[in-house]
Image (cartoon, rainbow, N blue to C red):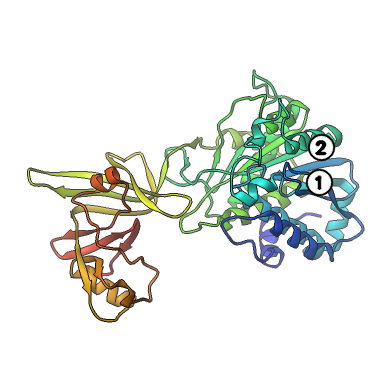
Amino acid sequence: MLINSEQILQSYQTSKVAGLDKPQIVHADIESSLQQLAGNFNSSMQLDIIGFSHNRKEIYKWTMGSGPLHILCWSQMHGDEPTATAALLDVINYFSSGCDPESCRALAQKVTLHFVPMLNPDGADESTRENAQGIDINRDADALQSPEGQLLNQLICQIKPQFAFNLHDQSRYYAQGNTRHGVSLAWLAPSGDKGESITDSRRLAMQLIGSLIEDLNTLGNANFARYEDGFSVRAFGDFAAQQGSACILIESGFVADDMNRQCARELNYVALLQAFYRIAQGRFAVQAEAQYHALAKNKAEGMTDVLIRNLNIQTHSKQYQIDVSIKRDNLGVASVDEVGDLHHLGGYNTFDAKGMLFEAGLAYPVTHPLELTNNRYDFLLRQGYCRFTGDLSLINNLTRRPIVRAIGESCPAQYRRKGLSPSWLIRDADGIQAAVLEGQLVILDN
């Protein structure tokens, strides 16, 4: 049953459930995916409807194994956090069709897995954090006013899991400490009391997280951080820890140009499977606890979508230099978030404009049909055009860049003040070197 992270990673492409690479996973996705996967379930697996949401949508639990070590995993208790839901379905697919039968059988004799792959179907269908009552389920562990919270409370109390995995997504603007790097996954071993005591079960969670970090580091290209600690009687991870579970919070993060968080989905898949095998084998390195404590802190608002450094602005009275942060909202609309000294920030897309000037740019008049290829767009940018006027229906846009209507401003701060999507050019002595097109950074080749 000895399986390493490289072997698990190799199984991912065949275990990855189709149709889930999208911004939001809804209740219908869960139903159709589980229905398709159920055809391959073996005798150690069971799928049940264990309750209903406030709007009477089914909440499912998948179970595998008969071992004495019970592991409970739940995802999407915040409806707009779907990454781990896809990963749990991938893991189910692995066990039902991709797992080596001998390894799967040996694991099922050691552990019993309980997955709730979507605790908040009402919120998922509306893409909201809260449920249909407007309640944040992860702030309902004490009051228990939501049916979903009541259900999770019952599961924790009835199953009494030795290990609990509380699976979330976090804002893409978290940074890995002061590194100016984004966070792929953030981790926490929640405390079960106000004194944040390190009990035996919490220490076990720390050791498991540290071991998983070591496993995942062998794969490279991932940044990990430790989520902010602090006990809350309203939070379910803390409640699980209070009940004696070794609770592991995993917050799926973000990497550049991966809006649907498929990198984090893959890391969840590897981490969860590696965790299950480690638990079954009792492989917890005592020294791995130090790896947990050594994790950089999860720094809020440490990243931005587009960061332009050292941009010179020339006004009627003076020239000055600023950094510019651009962010996109949930609908993809970009706006200037901040200007000034932003040396503390990291950016998923960055450009150093040192020695270069902001230029408002011109509007190109469209009077004839225009086949707008990347080369043609680059040519217009170099000529000083970054917007269009006239009959825009004549443009056949063959690029992935936006067609910007003729609205321009004299500096980035004006876009911010007016709430406009930013579009401008960046020039040096040799000509136009880059452009911002409705918040999209375009760097021109020399």
Describe the element under mark 1 as helix, strand or loop.
strand
Q: Position of residue 382 (x, y in %)?
A: 21, 69
Q: Residue 282 carries which label?
A: none
Could you tell me how many numbered marks the image carries? 2
Quadrant assignment for the N terminus: bottom right
- Who is closer to the viewer here, 251 or 55? 55
**Residue farthest left in this picture:** 317
Where 300 falls versus 90 (above or below)? Answer: above
Badge 1 amino acid: His
**In which quadrant of the rendered view does residue 286 lie?**
top right
Q: In which quarter of the image is the C terminus?
A: bottom left
Q: Which mark is first along the chain, 2 or 1?
A: 1
Q: Name the residue under label 2.
A: 155
Judge the density around disc 2: few (<14), some (14-19), many (≥20) Cα neighbours within 10 Å. Answer: some
Tell whether 211 sits left or right of 101.
left
Depth order, front residue of 129/255: 129
Can the viewer see residue 44 in this picture? yes
Looking at this view, name the residue that lies furthest to the top.
195
Task: Please tell me which residue lies in front, 72 or 54.
Answer: 54
Which residue is tagged 1? 114
* Residue 225, percent from left and from top: 54, 40
Residue 418, given in percent of the width and then of the height, sits at 28, 46
Q: Where is residue 86 in the image (x, y as percent from the top left)?
A: 67, 56
| Image: 245 above or below 433 | above
- Point 66% across, 27% down: residue: 234
Is any part of residue 215 visible from this angle? Answer: no
Q: Which amino acid does label 2 sit on?
A: Leu
The CA span between labels 1 and 2 is: 9 Å
Picture residue at 42% right of the left edge, 44% below the top: 303
**Circles 1 and 2: CB atoms closer than 8 Å:** yes
391 left or right of 4 in image: left
